[in-house]
Amino acid sequence: MQCPTPHIQHRPDGPTCLQDQKKNNHIEVKMAEDAQSTNANHPRQAASPSPPPPAPVPLTPGPRASRLQQVFGQALARTLRANSYANFSGCFPTPAKHVPASLESVWRQLNAKLEESAKAEFDDILHERDAVRHLNELDRLVGEARHRRDNGQGESRVAPHTLTPDELYRAHLTPYLQEAQSSLNARIQATEAENAELAQHIQSQRAEIERLLSSLESIVADIEGAAAAASHFSKENDLRQEAFKMDEEVKARSEI
């Protein structure tokens, strides 16, 4: 509800309007202070502990990139030296004899074109593969690794006098225990290999024993069959002998 302006005559409501204005001003001041405190706290929240971005890799050739370009230049120079005028003119003896100046000019142009095209192709390869930046990055990583190695970064150095007796004892005993453990592991592996070989040999022997038992059972069955046949034959032979005896007795009685 807005307070009436001064030109309107409402005298009885004057003090009330002043109080309302004071309240509104107080509220606005309070809101402004809250906004300022919020804005002041916002940068603290935004400033999170994020790792810094890596340093940009320079495009100027470093040691490895410079060495690569140097090796290429030396190889190209040796190639051009191999294509000397003496070798070139030996391939064209007739022009070398009659127009040596023209042949030498052609040779110079050929070498210049070869050198120009080789350098252009080499530069295209470097640009296509982004070799300079990658080699510079490799130089940076190697330099950081050497710096950490030389300064002993990443290694927890503990003063010996701060160690307890048990830690010192374990520190001196650990190498011997590791050596003994490696020796025991080697012996265990050798024993396991021997056990596996023996187990395989035992399995083969068991299979051979089973084959022998099966063949022995068949032999025993054959022997039993032969014994049964022999006993049956002996019984039949006894009957024949008795029959012969009876015939002899009958013949003897008939003669009497």
Image (cartoon, rainbow, N blue to C red):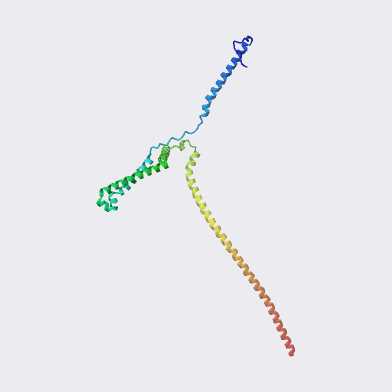
**Side of 78 where 127 appears, left or right:** right
Q: Position of residue 117 (x, y in %)?
A: 35, 45
Q: For residue 199, what is the image quadrant?
A: bottom right
Q: Position of residue 27 (x, y in %)?
A: 58, 18
Q: Quadrant of residue 58?
A: top left
Front-lying residue, 38 or 222: 38
Task: Give x and y (percent) for residue 149.
Answer: 42, 39
Residue 207 versus residue 53: which sits nearer the camera? Answer: 53
- The answer to whether residue 84 is above or below residue 166 is below
Q: Is residue 74 above or below residue 1?
A: below
Residue drawn at point x = 57 percent, y = 60 percent: 203
* Residue 71 seen anywhere in this rendered image of the structure: no
Residue in view at x 57 percent, y 62 percent: 205
- For the question of whether residue 98 can be seen, the reply is yes
Q: Position of residue 198 (x, y in %)?
A: 54, 58
Report whether 69 appears left or right of 194.
left
Q: Quadrant of residue 151?
A: top left
> Residue, x 49% and y 46% (percent of image)?
178
For this view, does 230 lie left or right of residue 158?
Answer: right
From the viewer's perspective, is 176 left or right of 83? right
In the image, 204 versus 105, the foreground residue is 105
The quarter of the picture where the C terminus appears is bottom right
Q: In which quadrant will I find the N terminus?
A: top right
Q: What residue is shown at x 72% (from left), y 85% (from top)? A: 247
